[in-house]
Image: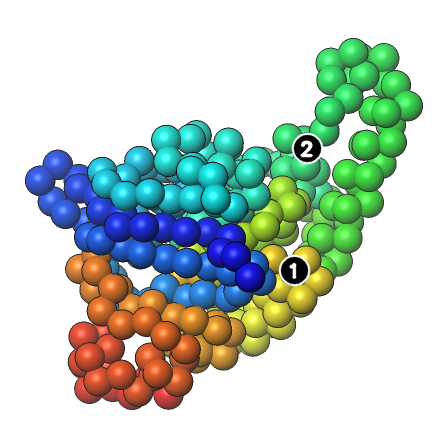
Amino acid sequence: MSDLLNVTHMTHYFGGLRAVHNYNLNIKPQQITGLIGPNGAGKTTIFNLITGVYTPTEGQISLENQSIVGLETNEIAAKGLGRTFQNLALWRHMNVLDHIRMAHYSQLNYGLFGAFFNTPACRRQEAEVEENAYRLLELFDIRQHADQLVVNLPYGAQRRVEMARAMATRPKILFLDEPTAGMTPDELVQMIKIIRQVHRDFNVAIFLIEHRMKFVMELCQHIQTLVFGEVIAEGPPEEIQNNPEVIEAYLGKEDLT
């Protein structure tokens, strides 16, 4: 099976500070990969480099064998790379349903004429958007909040809105930046179930950053450990969990179990 995403020898500097050094990543379709490391290791910077927020100083990034280096974030999203953010990027004064509907509009093709004259193509595509939006609200257990302003929702529900919005773009690979940040233990268990269902129902690859090790170990098939912008270890969860270098560099003497 060919790789979905390839990152090769990616290095990035902010001024004279080297934030990422010689980073490599290969993700196959439907694979779940985790990126762990202490605060300041460069994890979110790597997300931002791959998704087009920054352009890497060196290296190559390919999605389905096509380079995406230098493309705008919306162009990369249109090619099938969706993401959430460590700090919620939601519109405070828009309701939940409209968040999900808006995420579909880049896929509509009925044009200005269709919108102005409400053509059959316009009505058909808008009905499909509505149907898919409610399907996502059901999947992420937020349908009951459809008409509420997102700012009025509990934090865990806002996280699920952001994930539903990312899935509305129909990504081939989904980047999740700290998906359980600020969640209670019960919300964390619910998020594990949701991510598993998304992975199963949509056949989507997932690349996630997360500090909660049990979450990473339970979900991921492959894990990278990043320290000072460099990968010090990678492999399946059981190898990472028992790697002395990872334990010492990332958690001191604390066990990963």
At a point 31% along the width and 35% down the height, the residue shown is: 55
Front in this rendered view, residue 8 or 140:
8
Q: Is residue 129 visible?
A: yes
Percent position of residue 163, x then y:
57, 53
Pointer 2 local density, CA inside 10 Å: few below 14, some 14–19, many at least 20: few
Under tag 1, what secondary structure? loop
Q: Is residue 118 left or right of 209 when viewed as pictured?
A: right
Amino acid under disc 1: Asn
At a point 22% along the width and 53% down the height, the residue shown is: 22
User: What residue is pinned by disc 1?
Assistant: 203
Front in this rendered view, residue 241 or 184:
241
Sequence-earlier tag: 1 or 2: 2
Front in this rendered view, residue 207 or 39:
207
Amino acid under disc 2: Gln
Percent position of residue 220, x then y:
48, 72
Under tag 2, what secondary structure? helix
> What separation in Å lies between label 1 and label 2 (alpha carbons)?
19 Å
* In this view, 22 is above or below 225: above
Q: Which of the 4 image quadrants contains residue 50?
A: top left
Percent position of residue 86, x then y:
41, 53
The circle on residue 107 is 2
Q: Which of the 4 image quadrants contains residue 110?
A: top right
